[in-house]
């Protein structure tokens, strides 16, 4: 603000002026020094996060949200591969740009990246399919051993089983006594939809290739449509900032989860549990689902410890060490690396997990936090949506 603008010219700015004068005699002149300080009032901060005040706008926004969620629910078979492809595109975009920087054409770099992802996924599946099948058939056997040997855990296990029987009764199940542990064919449950999973994987890889190879096509077309140069520059800067922040977040979280998986695999190997690579992969996957994922991991590692080490207190060591790794990662490493800009409100995380699990099942639970983080980053960069981003901030 220049000196010609007084405090009354803009009621959003409060001006405070201090004036000090000095007068000397003789040949020296009379001087005056003026200092002016400006302070941004609270109203200016409020305009950084504008809130909708028109009831019609709020009502139309609510209708649009309900319509969008309805479409996402009924079109899950189509939308899920697209969402996975978009998330993978944001994660792998730096690799494609690196290949482009060493004079590899973008379509070839995108093809190499997709082939790398496919080879990694196929190799991991072929390496872990056998051990996973064996452990999936053995894990239910750990529950009766856990119930009979660890007296401190008898009451919690009985309580959980009683609640499950009550839920069966409420849903119309038979009240006849059932065995404590039912024989569950986990392998059939996992691989019952192999054809649908394969179709979704191929769709994801196909869309991912075109997203990576097309580059900035959609952005260029949008810039060509806009009439003013100022709007063109703003869109380009905004798009670059959003893509940069989202890519950094996804890459950082993936690296942190990979470190958790490596540490867990080493811990399981040191404790004498068979197939440590399998358990490291399990820890890597479940860590993408905050709060609920580590709980599932603790239960799985507890059963694996009992089956591998026998019914002794030493069998609790794998689950205990995994819990320690998770505490270090969740309370120290992740907050320190991601900083405040990328932290999310825990209540919003829980609500997102519940909602997207209800919408899309396990795939929705895996995508819940990445989608929530992407939403927060976009809202932070778009001025009309900054209030939503502020609500999601941890």
Image (tube, rainbow, N blue to C red):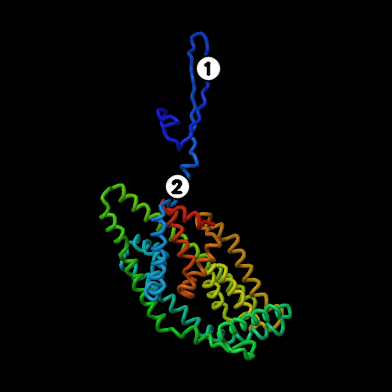
Q: CA distance from mark 1 to mark 2?
A: 42 Å
Which residue does the numbered mark 1 point to in the structure image? 22
Residue 367: % across, % down: 46, 69
Q: Earlier in the sequence, mark 1 or mark 2?
A: 1
Q: Are marks 1 and 2 in contact (CB under 8 Å)?
A: no
Which dot marks residue 48? 2
Q: Residue furthest right?
A: 151
For residue 7, above or below residue 176: above
Helix, strand, or loop for circle 1? strand
Residue 311: % across, % down: 69, 83
Q: Nearer the viewer, residue 326 or 17?
A: 17
Residue 120 horizontal side relative to residue 152, left or right: left
Near mark 1 (Cα within 10 A), the count class, few <14, some 14-19 or many ≥20, is few
Q: Nearer the viewer, residue 320 or 193?
A: 193
Residue 249: % across, % down: 47, 60
Residue 159 horizontal side relative to residue 53, left or right: right
Helix, strand, or loop for circle 2? helix
> Is label 1 or label 2 in front?
2
């Amino acid at each position: 603000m220049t000196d010609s603008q007084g405090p009354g010219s803009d009621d959003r700015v409060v001006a405070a002026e201090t004036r000090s004068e000095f007068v000397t005699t003789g040949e020296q002149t009379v001087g005056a020094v003026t200092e002016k300080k400006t302070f941004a009032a609270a109203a200016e901060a409020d305009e950084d996060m504008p809130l909708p005040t028109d009831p019609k706008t709020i009502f139309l926004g609510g209708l649009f949200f309900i319509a969008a969620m309805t479409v996402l629910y009924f079109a899950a078979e189509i939308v899920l591969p697209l969402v996975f492809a978009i998330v993978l595109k944001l994660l792998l975009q730096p690799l494609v740009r690196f290949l482009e920087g060493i004079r590899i054409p973008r379509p070839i770099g995108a093809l190499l990246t997709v082939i790398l992802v496919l080879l990694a996924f196929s190799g991991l599946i072929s390496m872990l399919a056998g051990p996973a099948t064996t452990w999936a058939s053995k894990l239910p056997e750990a529950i009766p051993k856990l119930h009979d040997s660890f007296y401190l855990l008898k009451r919690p296990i009985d309580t959980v089983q009683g609640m499950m029987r009550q839920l069966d009764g409420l849903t119309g199940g038979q009240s006849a006594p059932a065995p404590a542990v039912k024989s569950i064919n986990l392998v059939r449950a996992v691989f019952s939809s192999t054809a649908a999973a394969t179709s979704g994987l191929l769709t994801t890889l196909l869309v991912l290739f075109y997203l990576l190879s097309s580059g900035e096509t959609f952005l260029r077309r949008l810039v060509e449509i806009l009439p003013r140069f100022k709007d063109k520059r703003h869109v380009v800067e905004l798009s670059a900032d959003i893509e940069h922040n989202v890519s950094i977040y996804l890459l950082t979280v993936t690296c942190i989860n990979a470190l958790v998986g490596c540490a867990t695999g080493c811990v399981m190997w040191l404790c004498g549990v068979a197939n440590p690579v399998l358990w490291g992969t399990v820890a890597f996957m479940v860590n993408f689902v905050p709060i609920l994922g580590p709980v599932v991991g603790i239960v799985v590692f507890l059963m694996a410890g009992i089956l591998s080490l026998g019914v002794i207190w030493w069998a609790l060591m794998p689950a205990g060490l995994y819990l320690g790794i998770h505490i270090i990662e969740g309370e120290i490493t992740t907050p320190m690396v991601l900083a405040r800009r990328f932290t999310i409100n825990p209540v919003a995380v829980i609500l997102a997990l519940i909602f997207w699990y209800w919408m899309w099942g396990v795939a929705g639970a895996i995508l819940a936090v990445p989608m929530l983080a992407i939403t927060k980053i976009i809202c932070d960069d778009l001025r009309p949506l900054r209030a939503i981003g502020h609500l999601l901030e941890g």
